[in-house]
Amino acid sequence: MGGDGNSAYGHKTFSRSRSHFRDRITADGQGGRPVEAGRYRLVVSRACPWASRAVISRRLLGLEEALPMAVADPIQDDRSWRFTLDPDGRDPVLGIRYLSEAYDRRETGYPGGVSVPAVVDVPSGRLVTNDYQQLTLDLATEWTALHRAGAPDLYPAERRDEIDAVMAEVYRDVNNGVYRAGFATHQKEYEEACTAVFRRLELLGERLAGQRYLVGDTLTEADIRLFTTLVRFDPVYHGHFKCNRWKLAEHPVLWAYARDLFQTPGFGDTVDFDHIKRHYYQVHTGINPTGIVPLGPDLAGWLSPHRREQLGGRPFGDGTPPGPVPPGERVAAAGRPA
């Protein structure tokens, strides 16, 4: 999620920038950088759905020690993502106040703005990649030597064609679709995007009515990518982005599916509703000029029984759930359902 031009949202047609820095971190190092424990730092915002994919994947795979994480303030200023949640307003490892400093060390005059997730090379302080589409796939397939014992296979080779097809539809109509609706500048543009969002959600609901997960009987990358939009749907996309034909909580299948994932270790324990709401409502001044953050919705429902286990399935396949959240990464009480 970029950080420049926030006041322009709602005033110009929305177009998502392609990731500019696309170096890959691979097991053999041929992608540009070798996998190495402690060599890199993952910079995220818990508000951002694209960054949240990486947070969930990292936790499910047990990469917390191998790939340390920096969490940016959900409220940006004109220099984008900043480390004002840390002492003295600096990331304690990289020593920088703004993520843009790592971008500038890599290249000057880069297009597309400053976005998260971003992986920074710690020794040089330079950005390695902001390729949110490839990053989590590489965490699942290239970082395997550093996975925890019992880590799930989130991108199984025998299912990749189906996973890729599902993810492409989810990205076009749902992940990116809510933004096209929310930042539309013309009625027709909005209506087309909003219609596509709900058409795809209905199709996904039909798919999930008889199976617990999107592809196969275990969690995959496809579930992670759908979840990060669903968990933000009622708090921000329904009102802030005008995707209001119905609420997630009004769709029995998708609401149960989302709760099932939320209650699975590695998903809900990474979600910070406080960061999510404050970012969208306070940063996107082009569509919410008052900056007022709504009090609702009530989050208690996220912890209610979902009964999706009746469909069978094995969340982690032959693996096991991740352990407790590291103390320094626990979401504050303000961001969790009571």
Image (cartoon, rainbow, N blue to C red):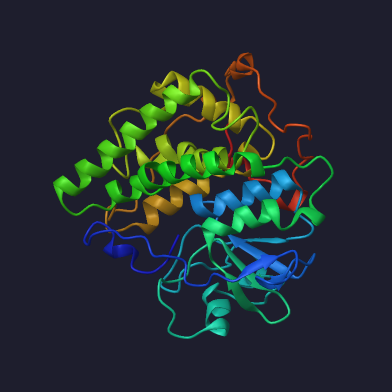
Query: Is any atom of residue 181 visible in this view?
Result: yes
Identity of the residue furthest to the left in this view: 187
The N terminus sits in image quarter: bottom left
Judge from the rendering whether residue 333 lies leftward or rightward of residue 205; answer left or right.
right
Residue drawn at the location 56% of the way across and 58% of the way down = 134
Q: Specify whether 80 is left or right of 270.
A: left
Q: Position of residue 68 (x, y in %)?
A: 73, 61
Instruction: Residue at 57% x, 33% y: name it.
Output: 215
Against 255, residue 243 (above or below) is below
Task: Give x and y (percent) for residue 99.
Answer: 55, 72
User: Is residue 140 shown above or below 78?
Assistant: above
Q: Is residue 137 left or right of residue 229?
A: right
Determine which quarter of the picture holds residue 94: bottom right
What number of labels is visible?
0
Residue 302 in sight from this viewpoint: no
As drawn, 131 above or below 124: above
Residue placed most toward the observer, 3 or 137: 137
Please state, as top left, top right, bottom left or bottom right, where the C terminus lies in the image: top right
Could you tell me which residue is drawn at 49 percent across and 24 percent down? 208
Residue 36 vs residue 165: left or right? right
* Residue 332 in the image, given as x and y percentages of width and height: 63, 45
Identify the residue at horizontal 44%, vertical 53% (top origin).
279
Residue 135, horizontal then vertical, whole percent: 60, 59
